[in-house]
Image: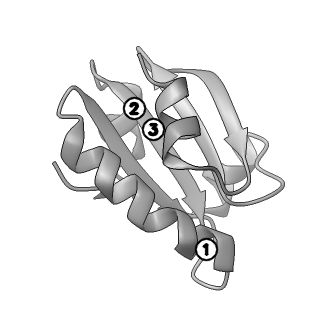
Amino acid sequence: MSVVELTKETFEAEVLREKKFVVVDFWATWCTPCRMLAPILEEVAEERADIKVCKLNIDETPDIAERYGIMSIPALLFFKDGNAVDESIGLISKERLLSFLP
């Protein structure tokens, strides 16, 4: 499965109503660490069909980033049953990302 690009309109359906474990990457095009994290997220999305990996551009959806208290990017929020259950701030390795997953 590929990484799902989120918008303000799709966030609720793709994340909050999703039954799978969801990883949401809060990112921006100007953020170098965000661009470095992108291929890691793509690998995990392809390898783990049991989870959903999503990206949310904070410049296009600042209200959602604000709702979840995103102050630094890249920021990963981990959702289970529509609730944020964990987070990781900054660039992380694939191994570290996998340690957050069920």
**Position above or below: 18 against 95:** above
Secondary structure beneath label 2: strand
Classify the position of the C terminus by image quarter. top left
Q: Nearer the viewer, residue 76 or 61?
A: 76
Q: Nearer the viewer, residue 28 or 45?
A: 45
Dots 3, 2 in contact, CB < 8 A: yes
Give the total of numbered labels: 3
Q: Which residue is identified by label 1?
A: 28
Q: Which residue is identified by label 3?
A: 23
Q: Residue furthest right?
A: 71
How crowded is the residue under tag 1: few (<14 C-alpha within 10 Å), some, or many (20+)? some
How far apart in space, not on screen, are marks 1 and 3 (Cα)?
Answer: 16 Å
The amino acid marked with disc number 2 is Val
* Residue 7 in view: no
The amino acid marked with disc number 1 is Ala
Secondary structure beneath label 1: loop
**Position above or below: 87 against 41:** above
